[in-house]
Image: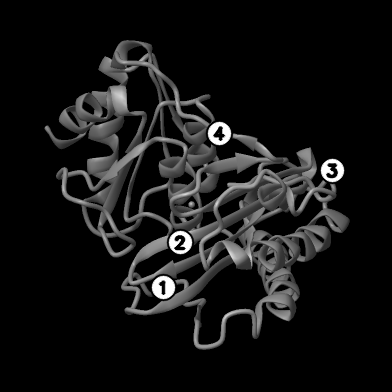
Amino acid sequence: MWLQTFDCGCRRDATMTFEARGKTMTAYGELLAPVVEAANRGADFLKARFDPQTRPADRAAMYHLGAGLEEASVAAVREVLDGVLPGAGWFDDEEERNLPPGEWWIVDGAEGGVNHVHGLPEWAVTIALVKDGIPQLSVVRQPVDDLTYTAVRGTGAWRNGEPLRVSAKTSLDSAIASTSQAGNSPGTHARFGRAVAAMSDRALLVRNTIPTTFPLLRVASGQSDVFWQYEPDLPGTAAGTLLATEAGALVSDLSGKPWDLNSPDILVAAPGVHSTALEVLSS
């Protein structure tokens, strides 16, 4: 998960902002406080080991550093989450793409670990609770900027207690589009290249970035307008898509069909540009 290519948002000292604002809590919403605490535990571990001067010498060094971060952060998260929702599974198979039915915790203990080990600030702990392939609760903790993003399905998206809303743009020529590292199935990289070229012809600009969660957070906050990905990263997509849709974004697969976590690709965009982006990417 560390290198793989859905808010009451609360600061560390404001975990209960969601309840304080009097929002209607779903059954899953009642789990929000312990999930935020779990994300804080993992993020504290990562932050204590973050050095902006880190520069790994090769791929082996990157994997060694990243795997250690992931393992220890996930262990810290599990100390809090184990027993929070009896019966929920723990989905931690990085290679498996088909999520079974039922309730599952999907956690990336070092989302953006490749950034962490290069001294870059875009990394986080992501936690999503998924039921039958649909994200129900999401927490993303980004300790470098002291940002906590939270969402419970049907109750909005939040960053440090403030509501998030997608952009009001209606024209793709003013839209910022982003994508992220594609999977490795045969032909995927060629398809990815064609899509970047097609979107570059129509959008204001196109960014290719990792990890998956961060461009989805930008769509949720209205700082970006379109995100798509082939063979999407499961933990980042699970957490980020709920945040974006609860902030008003539309989500589909790249054929225009309804999306779930078993879909082969994903498009998340502000409502005013989703249909045009879909046309560009499906052509």
Residue type, numbered disc 4? Leu
Q: CA distance from mark 3 to mark 1?
A: 31 Å
Q: Position of residue 205 (x, y in %)?
A: 41, 18
Q: Secondary structure at mark 2?
A: strand
**Other residues around mark 2 within 10 Å, as few (<14) / some (14–19) / many (≥20):** many
Q: CA distance from mark 3 to mark 2?
A: 38 Å
Q: Quadrant of residue 282?
A: top left
Q: Which dot, 3 or 2, sits closer to the camera? A: 2
Q: CA distance from mark 1 to mark 2?
A: 23 Å
Marked residue nearer the N-terminal end (1 or 2): 1
Q: CA distance from mark 4 to mark 3?
A: 33 Å
Residue type, numbered disc 1? Glu
Q: Which residue is mark 4?
A: 164
**Other residues around mark 1 within 10 Å, as few (<14) / some (14–19) / many (≥20):** few
Q: Which residue is mark 3?
A: 53
Residue lying farthest to the left in this orientation: 283
Q: Which residue is mark 2?
A: 136
Q: Is residue 260 left or right of residue 8?
A: left
Q: Which residue is mark 1?
A: 95
- Label 2 near label 1: C-beta < 8 Å? no
Q: Which dot, 3 or 1, sits closer to the camera? A: 1
> What is the image's colouring?
one colour
Residue for point 16% across, 43% down: 256
- Quarter containing the N terminus: bottom right
The correct choice, above or below, for 96 with respect to 136 in the image is below
Residue lying farthest to the right in this orientation: 48
Marked residue nearer the N-terminal end (3 or 2): 3
Q: Secondary structure at mark 3?
A: loop
Marked residue nearer the N-terminal end (4 or 1): 1
